[in-house]
Image: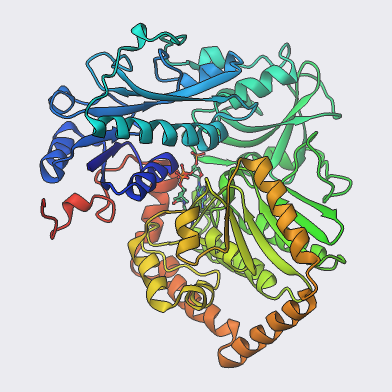
Amino acid sequence: MRILLLTHAFNSLTQRLAAELQQCGHQTSIEFDIADSVTEEAVALFAPDLIVAPYLRRAIAESIWSRIVCLIVHPGVVGDRGPSALDWAIQNQETEWGVTVLQAQAEMDAGPVWASASFPMRQTRKSSLYRQEVTLAASRAVLEAVQRFESGSFVPHAPATLPATRGQWRPLMKQAQRQLDWQRDSSATVLSKLCAADGFPGVADHLFGQPCHLFDAWPEATLRGTPGAVIARRETALLRATADGAIWIGHVKRANGIKLPAALAFAGDAQALPEQPLPDWWRSSTATWQDIAYEEAGPLGFLSFEFYNGAMSTTQCDRLRSALRWAKQRPTRVLLLMGGSDFWSNGIHLNVIEAASLDGGSAADESWRNINAINDLALELINTEQQITVAALGGNAGAGGCFLARACDLVWAREAVLLNPHYKNMGNLYGSEYWTYLLPRRIGSDAAQAIMRDRQPMTARRALQAGFTDACLAGELPVFRFEVAQRAAALATQSELAQRLATKRESRQRDEAVKPLAAYREEELTQMRRNFYGFDPSYHIARHHFVHKSPASWTPRHLARHRDLGWRLP
Ligand code: COA
């Protein structure tokens, strides 16, 4: 079938659905929901059999749903309606939740149900729930709904007539319903309210007497203070006392500002706070804020880095490189780079770069520092001589983050993961992280150019087929991590490990003799210098729109295939 994906943005859920539908043999194209007339034009050009709407912020026009079946993905159980489905599910401490695929009609979220899928709720942030459980359940339900539609014999029924209906209409959750009372709320209450609002819209509050929205909350088990007072800082996070303990705030968005690490957004005030470093930076703890951690199990070293949204600033890259250098000195045989739970890495930190320009500094200079810092990290990985390195992608990776992973000897990705191994969407950015060395030697130069040019997301399965990764492992995150440890243990005890390491060193020496890594880096950075400092400001404009979340005014051509000049209806 020809399926048009109508969406507010090409977010990870839309990317996954597009990939899954293509894998089932359907022809898909994307149109952003910009205006009814634009959608009508897309429908006329593509003549879809079906429209799937994974992520919309407004209703579909009657002129469209009255002619073509439009399947809406709603992140709620059957019968649930309204724009804050997940927020309410988290705040109401539901134990099980779901996704419903229903047909668009005049009344919002009330149309006939084509399919639904459920999942047990995890105590986590809304954004994490959306990227993991909701995305998986939505894929299952959409594929089932599409099959039912294709069969021609399925009759969908209104939610109210279905036996298992337990959802109900719930209004938009307002800030008044999210409001924090630092004097009275326990840490558990503050955490749950912040989790229900992450990564959008956050909870409106004040810090240092200034209005802001709070995100990225972490529990603290031991430190205490006067309720409401900001009592400490650690790296990028601030600690604020609650009625019975304290909560770390990782990110904030100041009025009219962009989302930033809290200690950067309030840099002046944060400086006056006592620093609370972890006594042992590597020792993993769930009882406090910690972004980099290291664990060892016999011959295996596990280095985790839980950077919010997978974005890696200059300082974060430098700190991770120090941790990596330290881990490389340990008597291990396999070193696993675990990333974070939702993201492995999305490359340089575009918000921190943007913030540099807001302070009267230079975004170009900060981009330059950041790309060099991430390159140094990639170099440290490539030059690991005593261990086999493995990038274990439990969460998504994008742009430079994909090539940072490829700087490891092996890349093992969880089946649910999406990769976007390309840069051009960010204002034609050329990219660095030694991709010109790492990618062609894996998949050949034509395939490397095609990946960069086509700018399509890859599922973990597709990435394995394309040769970009070395394994695709099924299961949810804990199962994936267990499987990764098993495979790594088998690798570490292989009798031929010493030989494997020797071969790796020799191959690196051979490559270096043919063309030094410094030459690849210099060539990439010559292009990047143009992106950052050159005449064409595309990268700066694209970054500005990305971090300020400017609404799209057209669908990029590489997504809207029906708008290709050569596109013809078969
Ligand atoms: N720097 C700062 N923030 C980033 C980021 C980066 N490199 N990459 C992603 N984010 C943030 C997004 O702004 C968004 O923030 P939110 O909390 O306000 O929602 C969040 O991470 C999730 O991103 P989103 O785009 O919704 O995720 P996705 O899974 O749908 O898409 C990507 C993933 C990688 C395709 C997309 O985020 C992207 O294009 N990122 C930029 C990558 C890049 O160009 N890096 C620089 C070159 S190395």
Residue 146 picture location, percent across and down: 30, 34
In the image, residue 45 sits, relative to residue 35, either above or below, namely below
Q: Residue at x 52, y 12 (%)?
A: 176
Residue 317 picture location, percent across and down: 66, 59
In the image, residue 89 sits, relative to residue 374, either above or below, namely above
> Where does the N terminus fall, quadrant-wise?
top left
Residue 206 picture location, percent across and down: 61, 24
Q: How is the image coloured?
A: rainbow
> 321 left or right of 124?
right
Residue 492 picture location, percent across and down: 79, 65
Instruction: Name the residue nearer the viewer: 490 or 226.
Output: 490
Residue 443 visible in image:
yes
> 91 left or right of 354?
right
Instruction: Name the residue nearer the viewer: 119 or 427.
Output: 119
Quarter holding residue 426: bottom left
Quarter holding residue 122: top right
Instruction: Residue at the far bottom: name it.
Output: 513
Q: Residue at x 16, y 38 (%)?
A: 38
Residue 419 visible in image:
no
Quarter holding residue 321: bottom right
In the image, residue 568 sits, relative to residue 50, either above or below, namely below
Q: Residue at x 64, y 60 (%)?
A: 391
Instruction: Name the residue nearer the viewer: 290 or 498.
Output: 498
Count of numbered circles on the image: 0
